[in-house]
Image (spheres, rainbow, N blue to C red):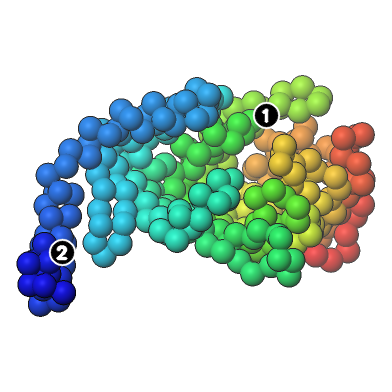
Amino acid sequence: MTPLLRKLLLIDLFKYHKLKMASAVLFFLLIFAWIFPFSDLSDFVTNFVSTQTRGQVFVQFNRLDFGFLPTVSIEGEDILLDVAATPTLQIDRLQIWPSLTSLLALRNNPNQIPNLSVQATGIFDGDIFAAVKNAKAKQEDLQLKTVEINAENVNLGKVSPLASLPLTIQGRANLKGEVVVNPEMQVQPEGDLQLDGKQVKIPPGNLPTQMGPIFLPGFSWKQVQLKTRLSNGVIYVEQATLGTSTDPIFLQVKGQLRLPIQTRGAQLQSYDLKMDLQINSKTAEELKSFLLFLERFKSPSAPGTHRYMFRAASNNPMAGGPNLQPLSNF
């Protein structure tokens, strides 16, 4: 090859100055990422999400930025998330770390859920970390994802409106768990979830029932604990405690609920729960009308305390109320 041709093809430049060229390209990308107005993309993201969800989801960023070191990341601040039929959700800061390999795989399978990690700060006045990654499946054509979640110091008062609970709940709670799910729900989720709450309160209010509204004077508990396991469409309640033995109401529950999850939702098919309810005399007097149907389940208890131990079960919850039976031990 002639010297002139070698110069025209930049062969010597690539051969002897590879490190310099690589450094130049790297610095160019860093400077480009630094000066590019990524925040101007917030309107594009808002319109894109709204279009893709047919107006069901609206998201707005006060600031949107991208990072490239040590890995690709998306970061937004002062975020408003509005989903149809739910209150507007505010997030102080949102960081997303997507997996590049799973994003590239979307070209062949656009319906696949990419692997990613998410850190939300200031959501429900707390912090939530979640991660999605691939899980091993016995069937080659079955897509499984492991979902990890760790929520800390979440304000229950801001969560209860999203859950459409009949009563307002106040307090703080932590939630952690790991669940293996199939996005198409060809198999049921498998995993564990644990909830720990502190200083949980229910303000005075009316509780809607089939017999009409019942006024509740309001309650508070030092702690709330819930430990469950999901397997084959069944939720196993391994430990559920509401309060402590020194609270006005102390409830312990264990058992199981058959609640298969489908793509269109979930429906309770059956349940079998054992309950140990302890109420001090003052609170029992306030709930006298509500406790009438539990009188036959009274068990020996400490002075100044009313104790009810019973089993609640049903094979068809949609057809009527539970079948209640007394328990000799919990």
Residue at image location 92% in from the left, 34% down from the top: 319
Q: Which residue does the numbered mark 2 point to in the structure image?
A: 9
Q: Amino acid at mark 2?
A: Leu
Horizontal relation, residue 264 to residue 118: left or right: right
Q: Nearer the viewer, residue 258 or 105?
A: 105
Horizontal relation, residue 76 to residue 213: left or right: left
Q: CA distance from mark 1 to mark 2?
A: 81 Å
Give the x, y percent position of residue 155: 44, 44
Q: Secondary structure at mark 2?
A: loop
Q: Is residue 14 above or below residue 281?
A: below
In the rendering, which numbered label is found on residue 207? 1
In what quadrant of the picture does the N terminus appear? Answer: bottom left
Give the x, y percent position of residue 306: 74, 51
Q: Amino acid at mark 1?
A: Leu
**Does residue 315 appear anywhere in the picture?**
yes
Give the x, y percent position of residue 253: 73, 57
Badge 2 crowding class, 10 Å Cα cut-off, few under 14, some 14 to 19, many 20 or more, is few
Q: Nearer the viewer, residue 41 or 323?
A: 41
